[in-house]
Amino acid sequence: MQSPPKIFIRFFRWYCNDHLSDAVLGDLLELYQRRRKFYSKRKADLLFLWNVLVFLQPFAIKRKSSPQNNIAMFENYLKITWRTMTRQKMYTGIKIGGFAIGLATCILIFLFIRNEMSYDQQYAHKNIYRLFNEWRGESVGHWTSFPANIHTILKKDYAEVEKAGRLIPFKWFNAGSNLLRRDDKVDNTYEEGFGYADNELLDILEIPMVYGNRATALVKPMSIVLSKKMADKYFPNEDPIGKILILNEDKTKPFEIGGVMEDFPPNSHLHFEFLITLTNVEFWQGEQTSWCCWNYNAYVKLRPDTDISAFQNKLTSMKDTYLLTHLEKNGDQSLEDEKAHHFFGVQRVEDIYLSWDDMGDDHADLRYIYLFGGIAVFILLLACINFVNLSTAKSANRAKEVGLRKVVGSFRSYLVRQFLTESLMYSFVSFALALLLVVLAMPFFNSLAAKQLSIPWMMWWFIPTLLGAAIVVGVVAGIYPAFYLSAFKPVDVLKGSVSRGLKSSGMRSAMVIFQFTTSIILIIGTFVIYKQMDFIMNTKLGFNKDQVIMIQGANTLNERLEEFKDELKQLADVENATCNNYLPVAGTNRDNNGFWKEGKTKIEKPVYGQHWAVDPDYISTLGMKLVAGRDFDKKLKSDTASLIINQKMAKEMGFKNPVGERMGNWRMYTVIGVVEDFHFDDMRQEIRPICFRLSKGGNIVSVKVKSKNIAGAIESVNKVWNKFMPHQPFRYTFMDESYARMYDQVDRMGKIFASFAALAILVACLGLFALSAFVVEQRSKEISIRLVMGASVKSIFRLLTQNFVQLVLVSFIIAAPLAWYMMRKWLEDYKYKITITWDVFVIAGTVSVLIALVTISYQAITAALANPAHRLRAE
């Protein structure tokens, strides 16, 4: 059947009054078909257009409703919505509850992502950058340390640099943590958050000052700047400028307070409580005038008109002029590698937190940000699907209402408005409940994510954004049910031919499958993360981290350190003790060096590895296994020129029989032993070469406890500490806890992931519960007849549950390969990892089916046990 051009029909519907539109258009189309029998299509189309234009008269044109009518109609919509909500309390509760959980999850994730994306946004000047190194070889690496004279070179050689300053943010000399006291006090307090900085850094980073002048606060040698929090702690209600602080009981180096700075904001990549001046500081002889001793971060403030790409290209000259010249002068074999692979660059301060994870910064993982953003969207979709499913499933109950309204003259557009109003009302109520849930859940979420998030009530954009989001979500969730319900024809309703229940329920089945596919992916992901973390915590590490107490601040014992350690070893609960700064857990020192075999020159390629200074008790205290040779012996003076290496170092050096071999860096050592490889980085990295040299002293005394009475052992150790250091706090941690801190971020993200997975499952189960209740309601007569005819409770239960179980199984078939692929990609970050085995999928599938069965069992069992006479009484 041919029809006139659609544009003519649309024009007619656009201007014609709704109560005339359908009847007149039907007559015109009928007339058009008769004309087509006698005229060409072109002539029939023109005659149709002529009829449309002729009918364009005042009586036929749409008229806008009066404001009073609109208000009255809106009030009517609200009344109907309220009655519907109160009449169907269970469905209303599930719709609102699912919506609220989905929205609350979205709000929490939005606040989390907003916090992650807001780091270092406080700077008024946007041309603040940090220099970094990039190695572009077989693998790509980044680091931020530069030689001591980097700031001088930048200011001298580059006109684009307005200011340049250095920072030592990592634990080095007195950076990191220290014992601290006022010079007029006796007792020390342990404080963290120390760093070294040039005075120019205060201005580059626009650090606001509470006391003192930013231009001079760190100019004087031996000056220090405190945070406001520390100033209030040590000098309450005082101006601390000019006061003296003593670090680590070193009275020969008193620090004078030059200023008090505002506390760093929580969303900053820097967090310092104390900044010590770098004026006249030289950690290594000659470092200020040579290209060596890469211990400094460099920040620059560039001029506003600087072309960043051009400036980065110009940094190549710094490599040529200083780095390569230095290497060539010293005959270093790495000259060609450095020339080909080593590059300098700058990154905006605002980008540091979201940049590479190999630069030692506190940083965000963009993958988790994208992942959680995706989870938020999916959970909200699950909530919207619940609304759509329940609205369309209950369509039979609303069919008579729609039919009667159309019979008495209501137009489809009015019905669409009514159902959208209903959806929006659900959305607004759900948003109010979601905000309450967010307020209640915020402390738990902050603890889980290690954040200090809060609801930004006072931000001008927050409430309007929520209202806008409520409208969008309400319209998105309600648009399909509105058009679906309003499309019922009065004749079909009166004939009773409107589809009931889950007949023609393909769309609802697809939505249930989508919900459970998402939930099962999250379940499998949670299991894989849990298994990987369990593997990390319980795998063989090559050392024993259990029952080892790490006592901090031992460097202040000075010459009494060995005496203190010997007295500890006399305690009944103590097996052994060692003192050094290098341990295979988070928060301790690392020292990377290049090593050569004896007879090789520095022109040849070195083996790079860690070089740790340890005492004779180190290997035995940490339970490392010697696979060749012997341990250090403090009675043998020759052991100060000896090394113990790991198996990886022996392999890299090419030693077949390592014991007795000679190797070194700036001096030669004799290898006296080989330890089994052990993990001193996290599991993302492959075990690297390492060697131990004999030394004394350090900041950490590690005590191996041999009894199960840990509390008693700590008390005994504390007494010994107080005997030696009565004015210093006794600080300790457990080695297994320090090891676990290497995976804090992964552990936090795993717990957040599991929480969101639980919420997604809850939302999906709410929808499944409501749908199962509806199925029972719609099939109540069928169930009653089956029971009368002798059907068993078991058969009724199977009848009501099998369709839902089948949908969950289909969901599992879809979810399993998707989850396997995604989690395999996640595990690629780890050099040492689990294999995703079949049991993960079996457990996830079983859990999913059990959850579905438990969800629908109540409705199914209730229906199967009900008295059929009650349902058939009215028949």
Image (spheres, rainbow, N blue to C red):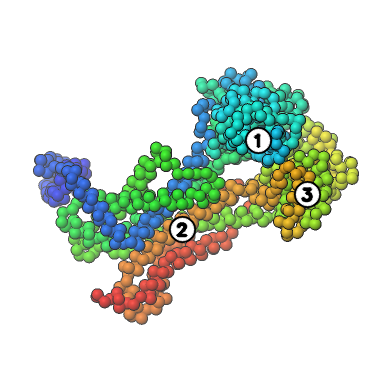
| Residue matched to label 1 | 194
Q: What residue sits right under mark 2 in the picture?
A: 761
Give the mark nearer the N terminus: 3 vs 2.
3
Q: Residues within 10 Å of mark 1 (few under 14, many from 20)?
A: many
Label 3 Cα crowd, 10 Å radius (few <14 / some 14-19 / many 20+) = some
Q: Which mark is residue 720?
A: 3
Where residue 383 appears, as percent x and y from the top left, is 39, 54
Mark whose residue sits in front, 3 or 1 = 3
- Residue drawn at x 48%, y 44% is 454
Answer with left or right where residue 533 lies relative to residue 35.
right
Residue sitting at x 46%, y 55%: 760
- As drawn, 784 above or below 107: below
Residue 309 percent across, percent down from the top left: 54, 26
- In the depicted structure, whether residue 373 falls above or below residue 96: above
Q: Is residue 863 left or right of residue 228?
A: left
Return the residue nearer the eye: 65 or 511: 65
Quarter of the figure with residue 645: top right
Picture residue at 58% right of the left edge, 49% below the top: 746
Q: Secondary structure at mark 2?
A: helix
Secondary structure under the numbered disc 1 in the rendered image: strand
Q: Amino acid at mark 3?
A: Val
